Image (cartoon, rainbow, N blue to C red):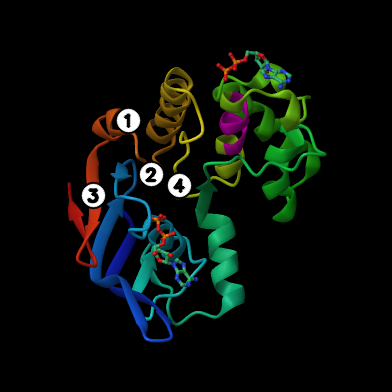
Amino acid sequence: STVLELKAVQRHYDQGEEHLAILADADFSLSSGEMVALVAPSGAGKSTLLHLAGLLERPNAGDVVLNGRACGALGDDERTAIRRNEVGFVYQFHHLLPEFTALENVMMPQMVRGLDRTEAARRAAQLLDYMRVGSRAQHRPSELSGGEQQRVAIARAVANAPSLLLADEPTGNLDPDTAVYVFEALEALVRQSGLAALIATHNHDLAARMDRRVTLSGGKIVPL
Ligand code: ADP
Ligand code: ADP
């Protein structure tokens, strides 16, 4: 089924005389179980697109539809609730909380949602095992390698079983072998859970392994 739809989305930034159009009547659609690579040069608008898709930003015109729900007309509280339930984010840098263990970091989004602590810990441990970082559950982020930190960050992103995973250069900070290892763990997770995933990457080898590749051109989202 269709998880994410962008309908005639416009996004521009105005600074004084400067008018910068990032998206102009852009359409896009992403289904569950689909892994799509977003490949475009720096400054093209990849982060903007991911923030629009994840309801962190609002378009100037057009709408973002998540699981059939048009989100433009919704208030901020409702958008936040949808984001917490439906969307997981992974960034180039892990953004794990330094004073908490890997396990606690993965428990956090579930605790925020009010889940029982024991249940949250059980699911977090399962996800860390799945990401092959279960043996590091009691370590803090600073005690983990870059690849391990990203695998924990991915586990955290899916802790609330979202339907949409948005990743901004998730392997951009890793050496090539580690990047492949982390990507394969992410791929297995997407395949197993039926997530829809949109992954911004500069890595053409990894992009080639996804179901589709898109880029930004003239304000549109087009096949690459
Ligand atoms: P990418 O992720 O592809 O590098 P971004 O989405 O971060 O691109 O940015 C796209 C363009 O929009 C860049 O030129 C950036 O400087 C500009 N931009 C991003 N956010 C803002 C903002 N809040 N105000 C003004 N310009 C912005
Ligand atoms: P990966 O390939 O999974 O990224 P590495 O080969 O980089 O792992 O690291 C090997 C082991 O060394 C891992 O178990 C990791 O936790 C540990 N390690 C790497 N960097 C650090 C660090 N700064 N502090 C503590 N342990 C580390």
**Residue 32 percent coordinates (x, y):** 34, 46
Looking at marks 4 and 3 on the same chain, the residue that comes earlier in the sequence is marked by 4
Distance from the alpha carbon under mark 4 to that under mark 2: 6 Å
Q: Quadrant of residue 189?
A: top left
Residue for point 45% across, 47% down: 168
Label 4 sits on a secondary structure element that is strand
- Mark 1 belongs to which amino acid? Leu
Distance from the alpha carbon under mark 1 to that under mark 3: 13 Å
Looking at marks 1 and 3 on the same chain, the residue that comes earlier in the sequence is marked by 1
**Residue 84 percent coordinates (x, y):** 59, 58
**Residue 110 percent coordinates (x, y):** 69, 47
Crowd band around label 1 with a 10 angstrom C-alpha radius: few (<14), some (14–19), many (20+): some
Crowd band around label 3 with a 10 angstrom C-alpha radius: few (<14), some (14–19), many (20+): some
Label 2 sits on a secondary structure element that is strand
Disc ID at residue 64: none
**Dot 1 corresponds to which residue?**
206
Looking at marks 1 and 4 on the same chain, the residue that comes earlier in the sequence is marked by 4
- Mark 2 belongs to which amino acid? Ile
Left or right: residue 112 compared with residue 61: right
**Dot 2 corresponds to which residue?**
199
Residue for point 69% across, 16% down: 135
Label 3 sits on a secondary structure element that is strand
**Dot 4 corresponds to which residue?**
168
